[in-house]
Amino acid sequence: MENLQESKNLIADSKNIYLVPDENPEAITSALSLFYSLNDLDKKVNLIIENIPENLKFLTPSLDFISYPKNFIISIPSKTADISQISYEKNEEAVKIFLTLEKGKINKDDISLYLSESKPDLVITLGIKDYSEQLKGRLNDSGFLLDAPVLNIDSLISSEQNNMQKNKKFGKINIVEEKPLLEITMRLINNLSL
């Protein structure tokens, strides 16, 4: 019960939450339940799922619920050119960005473009036994998640039934119990609304 109260406090203090479920149907269903519940609490929630089973696609959030990075960054190394002024012009057809150079020159190869992901305040894993090992291939594009505090939710039942490894309790808070994952998740959701 102590972990539930700590989890509730951690979630209450977080604005930007990422959910990372295992790829099994119970973990995905648990993540989707938590996604909608956190969204109802006005949290910015991102769900990291590569493949949703066909029979669960009807539960998938519409594009209205999905938050994409809103910050696009154009980067030019200072050693390339000394930029003294930046301005832009925006019309119906395009946005033009004007750079006034004090000295140096900029080549096309000097310019980097990328999206700025907002760093999560909290990562919630569902059904993940070993965060760094299981997600090694899945988090290549989302490495920024690795520094955020983790709420680790998992079931000991699934690890025994599937003869898998035990949970490594890698989270700041670990809710790892001998109950089905969906039951643990629903208890957390019910605790959040109290």
Image (spheres, rainbow, N blue to C red):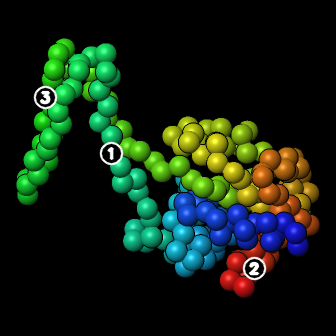
3D distance between C-alphas at marks 3 and 2: 56 Å
User: Where residue 190 appears, x then y in whole percent?
Assistant: 73, 82
Q: Earlier in the sequence, mark 3 or mark 1?
A: 1
Residue 100, which numbered label? 3
Asked if marks 1 and 2 touch (Cβ < 8 Å), the reply is: no
What residue lies at 85% left-to-right and 46% top-to-bottom?
168
How packed mark 3 is, by other alpha carbons closer than 10 Å (few <14, some 14-19, many 20 or more), is few
- Secondary structure at numbered mark 1: strand
- Secondary structure at numbered mark 2: helix
Q: Closer to us: mark 3 or mark 1?
A: 3
Locate the C terminus and report the quarter of the image it occupies: bottom right
Asked if marks 3 and 2 touch (Cβ < 8 Å), the reply is: no
- Secondary structure at numbered mark 3: strand
What residue lies at 82% left-to-right and 58% top-to-bottom?
174
Which is nearer the eye, 124 or 194? 194
Q: Which residue is mark 2?
A: 191
Residue 72, which numbered label? 1
